[in-house]
Image: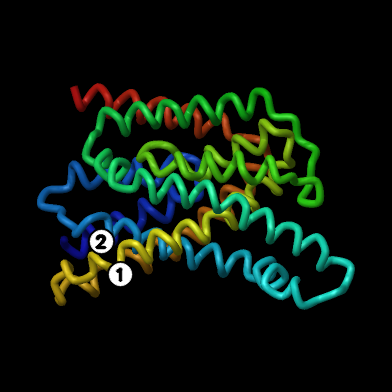
Amino acid sequence: MTLFQAIFLGLIQGLTEFLPVSSSGHLAIAQHFLPGFEQPGVLFDVLLHVGTFVAVILYFRRELVDLGTSPFRRDESSRLHRRLLLLLIAGSVPTAVIGLAFKDFFEGLFDNIPVVSVMLLVTGTLLFLSERFRCEGRKEDKLTLSDALVVGTVQGMAIIPGISRSGSTIATLLLKGVDGETAARFSFLLALPAVFGAALLSIKDLHGVPTHQISLYLTGAGVAFVTGLLSIHLLMGVIRKKRLFAFAIYCWLAGGLFFALSL
């Protein structure tokens, strides 16, 4: 892997992790067409996700402090935060089960560009349906266990490259009548345990990284962190203005183009 490839892929990860266009799908396509790109397992991809993981922690640091301290507080807001923490834990269970059960199968799809392209078409359709039939209203205090389990299952399925994690989880919550900003916050917070778990599972691949390439891996993660912060701001604005349809069109065009090129 070269410095250009590390920076380029870090930019792609940072821009597409939070925008609902599938970072895994874009990484799979980019890596397929980059000459000479190699990585042990999907370690580099996971480190890029760690970069955006840190971006989420920074952006939502106040919410995370409130969640982490809620079991030890007895003020009025602590009850809501304890309830939200339990919902995040519940939503992480189906994600973990799906990820552990189908990890090898899903990783094998990263080289299958036709599948990735079709999944981008699926992502576009989910975004279109959520924008067309969204029925907003429910805030964080109205989230249910059903919301958490359903969106956790959807997040687990989003391991398939081409299915946008943020897009599919936010779309699911919108279709279930959750307010847009609440859906986005819950989606981002729910991603943290999943990315942390994926990073732990990929530690075994570290021995396959040549020493001189470690700095390139860290550079890619750093670029993903910076651009990830920017894309979080952008998506929150898009959610407020109800303009997910533009990303649906993009996913349809990108999926159709790369499917045609793969034939």
- Where residue 53 appears, x then y in whole percent? 48, 63
Q: Residue at x 67, y 31 (%)?
A: 175
Judging from the image, what secondary structure is the residue with disc 1 in?
Answer: helix
Mark 2–mark 1 contact, CB under 8 Å? yes
Q: Secondary structure at mark 2?
A: helix
Relative horizontal placement of residue 222, taking residue 133 as reference (left or right): left
> Mark 1 Cα within 10 Å, few/some/many (few <14, many 20+)?
some
**Which residue position is annotated with label 1?**
219
Q: Nearer the viewer, residue 158 or 101?
A: 101
Q: Which mark is residue 59?
A: none
Quarter of the image for residue 121 reads: top left
Answer above or below: position of 46 versus 58.
above
Q: Is residue 129 above or below residue 69?
A: above
Which residue is drawn at the image coordinates 76% and 63% (left, top)?
81
Q: Residue at x 47, y 31 (%)?
A: 123
Q: Quadrant of residue 214?
A: bottom left
| Left or right side of 250 for 105 | left
- Residue at the spot of label 2: 6
Of mark 2 and mark 1, the one earlier in the sequence is 2
- Mark 2 belongs to which amino acid? Ala
Please determine whether, in this image, residue 231 is positioned above or below residue 114: below
Quadrant for the C terminus, please: top left
Q: Is residue 191 left or right of residue 48?
A: right
Name the residue type under label 1.
Answer: Thr
Q: Report x, y in % for residue 201.
A: 34, 62
